[in-house]
Image: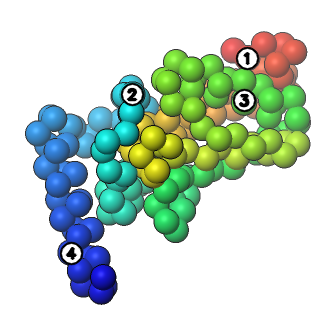
Amino acid sequence: MDRRLREAAGLQALADWLDARRTCGHDWNVDLATRRCVPCEGGVPPLPREAAQRLQTAVPAWTLDDEVRSIRRTFRFRTFREAIGFVNAVADLAEEEGHHPDITIRYSRVTCTLTTHAIGGLSENDFIMAAKIDRLHAALRGRGGDGGQGLLDPARGVP
């Protein structure tokens, strides 16, 4: 398929996706972190590049991969215990939402990667979870960055 056909197909996919969002009454001004993930059993296409890029603006710290199959962010902490506390909080959030990130821990760094495996690419759920993880991180850092009280330390319990 030549470049023009690929671009036309991508634009049509974006137009179809935007039409579907308008039909469902999607409000672009709603904070993604306030939305809920919806179960995805497959049967729907992954987000087209343009839609993923548009949603990515709501979670600018997350990086969209070249194939538009996943988004990723690395979080840094002062200690390994804080990193594990964050991972445990993300695990609880993922269970609540029914949408689970791939998580890699490297001492005081935690990398979260989001993709919707059932469709082999990105869905709105990935961006909703990214926004929720960002909000969780900000809340925990706000409480944990208080002179070393270690509120992200799992031995003290995650607030």
For the residues marked 2 and 3, what is the alpha-carbon distance in whole angstroms? 24 Å
Query: Which label belongs to residue 34?
Result: none
For the residues marked 1 and 4, what is the alpha-carbon distance in whole angstroms? 48 Å
- Which of the colour schemes (rainbow, by chain, secondary structure, one colour) is used? rainbow
Q: Amino acid at mark 3?
A: Phe
Place of residue 87 in the rendered image (x, y in percent of width and height, measured from the top left) = 72, 30
Whichever of callouts 2 and 4 sits on the residue coming sooner in the sequence is: 4
Which corner quadrant holds the N terminus?
A: bottom left
Callout in the foreground (4, 3): 4
Left or right: where does residue 113 sit relative to residue 155? Answer: left
C-beta proximity under 8 Å, tags 1 and 3: yes
Place of residue 59 in the rendered image (x, y in percent of width and height, measured from the top left) = 47, 48
Whichever of callouts 1 and 3 sits on the residue coming sooner in the sequence is: 3
Q: Quadrant of residue 50?
A: bottom left
Place of residue 57 in the rendered image (x, y in percent of width and height, measured from the top left) = 41, 54
Q: Amino acid at mark 2?
A: Pro
Q: Which residue is mark 3?
A: 86
Q: Amino acid at mark 1?
A: Val
Q: Which residue is mark 2?
A: 39
Q: Which residue is mark 1?
A: 158
Q: Which residue is mark 4?
A: 8
